[in-house]
Image: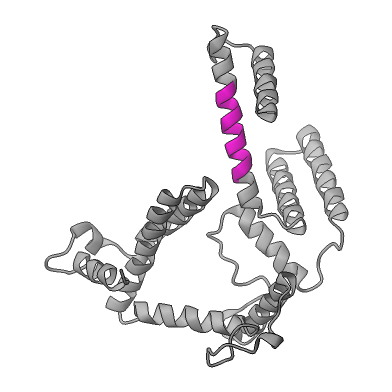
């Protein structure tokens, strides 16, 4: 199936006379949170390797794209075709090792084969694009969306700063920085105010995100994996408590710790 039925459906939902009252009442601002939510659900389906859910969640995310494009078209700003045209042009421009400027394939002999080299080329092209739009920039860290999850934004901020040479050359130096920030959290806990403690925890989290970048790890994805692991082990701990006739509410911390350790050991042995 092509995209046309979805575009027609969206137009019908937004029809002022016969459409859905809820859909008609929406604005890009009012539905913006749904785009973030749907993107997270796509990532969750990928993490769970659930093809059925991934298909459905990609559809929900695509629906958000079509919804925003329809409202923009109604306002005379741009159309869905403009969205497609813009992303196609951008991808051609950012893949000069694959496409000539007119979109035709480049000779294979001139194509990059090293993913790291491609990534460096991509970053350089993006930097040139930003430099070519001075009216949209007020500083070297402009253009990094504030709506991103905080850990993802921290990684992108540190990555942008690194393009200007403001970075460590060795992950070991970043680990040392994480330890330094941990010590500062401990000092703020002992002697600082609540505001100072909050600031130091933020510095620690920023350093951890920076470490993840140096290791080639997406900090948001990594934390989500950690969350899933905690959920799995906590559930297993509760099951072990129940098997021993103890409820979570009645268990002491020592009892919970014993069950937690047993759950971890069983997981590693399985």
What is the residue that sits farthest to the bottom in this orientation? 102
- Quarter of the image with the N terminus is bottom left
**Quadrant in the rendering for residue 110:** bottom right
Q: Is residue 230 magenta?
A: yes
**For residue 9, side relative to residue 187 (left or right):** left
The residue nearer to you, when weighing 198 against 260, is: 260
The residue at the point 37 percent across, 59 percent down is 59
In the displayed structure, 176 sits above or below 155; it is: above
| Rendered view: 237 above or below 227 | above
Taken as a whole, is the magenta stretch helix, strand or loop? helix
Residue drawn at point x = 58 percent, y = 16 percent: 240
110 left or right of 182 in image: left
Q: Is residue 43 magenta?
A: no
Q: Nearer the viewer, residue 106 or 258?
A: 106
Residue drawn at 64 percent across, 89 percent down: 107
x then y, percent, for residue 105: 57, 87
Q: Residue furthest front?
A: 108
The spot of residue 115 in percent (x, y) is 71, 70
Question: What colour scheme has been applied to the protein in the rendered image?
Answer: one colour
User: Foreground residue, 86 or 184?
Assistant: 86
Q: Would residue 268 be seen by someone viewing this image from the given angle?
A: yes
Displayed quadrant of residue 4: bottom left
Q: Which stretch appears magenta?
A: 224-236
Q: Name the image quarter holding the C terminus.
A: top right
Q: Residue furthest top?
A: 245
Task: Determine whether 73 is above or below 64 in the image.
Answer: below
Residue 67, position in %: x, y? 32, 66
Number of callouts in the render?
0
At x 35%, y 73%, the residue is 69
Give the percent coordinates (x, y) of residue 225.
Answer: 61, 43
């Amino acid at each position: 199936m092509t995209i046309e039925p979805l575009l027609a459906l969206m137009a019908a939902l937004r029809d002022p006379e016969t459409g859905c009252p809820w859909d008609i009442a929406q604005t890009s601002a009012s539905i913006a949170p749904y785009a973030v939510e749907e993107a997270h659900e796509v990532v969750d389906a990928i993490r769970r390797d659930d093809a059925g859910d991934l298909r459905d969640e990609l559809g929900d995310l695509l629906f958000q794209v079509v919804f925003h494009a329809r409202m923009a078209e109604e306002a005379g700003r741009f159309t869905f075709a403009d969205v497609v045209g813009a992303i196609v042009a951008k991808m051609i421009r950012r893949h000069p090792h694959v496409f000539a400027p007119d979109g035709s394939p480049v000779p294979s002999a001139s194509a990059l084969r090293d993913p790291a080299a491609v990534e460096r080329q991509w970053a350089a092209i993006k930097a040139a694009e930003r430099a070519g739009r001075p009216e949209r920039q007020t500083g070297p860290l402009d253009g990094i969306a504030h709506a991103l999850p905080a850990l993802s934004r921290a990684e992108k901020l540190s990555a942008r700063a690194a393009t200007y040479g403001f970075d460590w050359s060795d992950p070991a130096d970043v680990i040392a920085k994480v330890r330094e920030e941990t010590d500062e959290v401990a000092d703020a806990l002992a002697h600082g105010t609540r505001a100072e403690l909050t600031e130091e925890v933020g510095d620690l989290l920023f350093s951890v995100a920076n470490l993840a970048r140096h290791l080639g790890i997406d900090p948001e994805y990594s934390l989500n994996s950690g969350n899933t692991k905690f959920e799995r082990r906590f559930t297993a701990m509760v099951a072990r408590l129940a098997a021993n006739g103890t409820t979570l509410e009645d268990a002491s911390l020592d009892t919970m710790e014993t069950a937690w350790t047993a759950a971890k050991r069983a997981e590693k042995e399985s």
